[in-house]
């Protein structure tokens, strides 16, 4: 999930053709319509997944029903390694999506047989931790418009063409609010502020264009 890597780390990175074939042998394809769930928080962890196409959303809910969106997941992302016997979060499809599904037990066993695969999983875990720390800092220290820039930079960096200026926002304003720790009203005001200042153009609720890349980066990285 590292946005700045020219060649993002995936579970397939560095595998030989024979090792890749063994990993592919574990996988089956699964299709999700927009709004469908891949799995729910607290359900037994039985599979791991690689997102092949589409956009997924990872979220976690408290016992009181409060929701925190943890990540918007894009093709290549690896999903599902548990910390215990149950998933700690819920994953749903924001768009029509396709994942490669692999049985957890067989995948863990294959890690022990393919050191590069184990290293990749460890590296992905480190990238996820770095992403989480960035998000925690953004939630705790940044102003609302800076948080929106934080999200826009993430989406731009991880687009099919890294650094793309036009961004499709497939998530709802509520999803964005729950990701950035804001209310919907505050998110709307933050987008409005960035538009008035000429930083972005807003074409619809789901499409924006970054007009001032330097300003977005500066606000996204503001301490």
Image (tube, grey):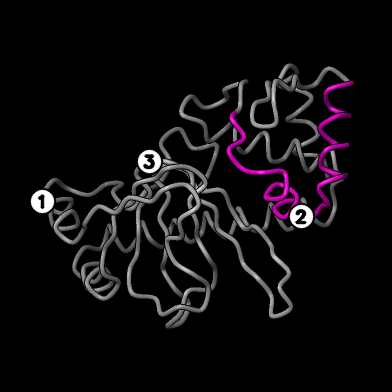
Asked where in the image residue 30 lies, by quadrant, the reply is bottom left
Q: Secondary structure at mark 3?
A: strand
Which SS does the magenta portion mostly show?
helix
Where in the figure is residue 128, as x and y percent of width and height?
54, 57
Kindly identify the residue that appears in the image at 68 percent across and 21 percent down: 209
Where in the figure is residue 79, as x and y percent of width and height?
42, 59
Q: Which residues are magenta?
A: 168-196
Of labels 2 and 1, earlier in sequence is 1
Q: Which residue is mark 2?
A: 137
Kindly identify the residue that appears in the image at 46 percent across and 29 percent down: 160
Where in the figure is residue 91, as x and y percent of width and height?
50, 60
Where in the figure is residue 100, as x and y percent of width and height?
29, 53
Q: Which residue is mark 1?
A: 18
Task: Return the mark for residue 80.
Answer: none
Quadrant where the C terminus is found in the figure: top right
Of labels 2 and 3, earlier in sequence is 3
The residue lying toward the viewer, choosing from 111 and 48, is 48
Q: Secondary structure at mark 1?
A: helix
Kindly identify the residue that appears in the image at 51 percent across and 79 percent down: 42
The single residue placed furthest to the left in the displayed view is 18
- Residue 190 in magenta stretch: yes
Asked where in the image residue 120 lies, by quadrant, the reply is bottom left
Q: Is 65 above or below relative to 129?
A: below
Q: Residues within 10 Å of mark 2 (few under 14, many from 20)?
A: few
Q: Which residue is mark 3?
A: 53
Q: Is 19 above or below relative to 170?
A: below
Counting labels gives 3
Q: CA distance from mark 2 to mark 1?
A: 41 Å
Q: Secondary structure at mark 2?
A: helix
Q: CA distance from mark 1 to mark 3?
A: 24 Å
The residue lying toward the viewer, choosing from 143 and 114, is 143
Foreground tag (1 vs 3): 3
């Amino acid at each position: 999930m590292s946005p700045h890597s020219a060649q993002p780390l995936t579970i397939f990175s560095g595998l030989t053709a024979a090792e890749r074939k063994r990993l592919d042998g574990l996988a089956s394809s699964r299709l999700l319509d927009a709004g469908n769930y891949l799995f729910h928080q607290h359900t037994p962890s039985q599979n791991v997944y690689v997102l092949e196409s589409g956009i997924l959303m990872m979220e976690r809910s408290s016992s009181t029903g409060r929701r925190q969106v943890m990540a918007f997941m894009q093709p290549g992302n690896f999903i599902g390694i548990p910390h215990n016997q149950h998933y700690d979060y819920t994953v749903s499809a924001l768009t029509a999506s396709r994942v490669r599904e692999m049985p957890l037990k067989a995948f863990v066993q294959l890690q022990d047989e393919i050191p590069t695969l184990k290293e990749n999983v460890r590296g992905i875990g480190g990238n996820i931790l770095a992403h989480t720390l960035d998000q925690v800092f953004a939630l705790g220290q940044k102003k609302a418009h800076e948080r929106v820039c934080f999200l826009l930079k993430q989406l731009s960096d991880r687009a099919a063409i890294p650094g793309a200026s036009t961004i499709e926002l497939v998530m709802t304003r509520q999803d964005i609010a729950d990701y950035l720790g804001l209310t919907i009203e505050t998110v709307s005001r933050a987008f409005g502020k960035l538009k008035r200042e000429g930083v972005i153009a807003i074409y619809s609720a789901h499409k924006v264009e970054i007009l001032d890349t330097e300003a977005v980066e500066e606000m996204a990285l503001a301490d």
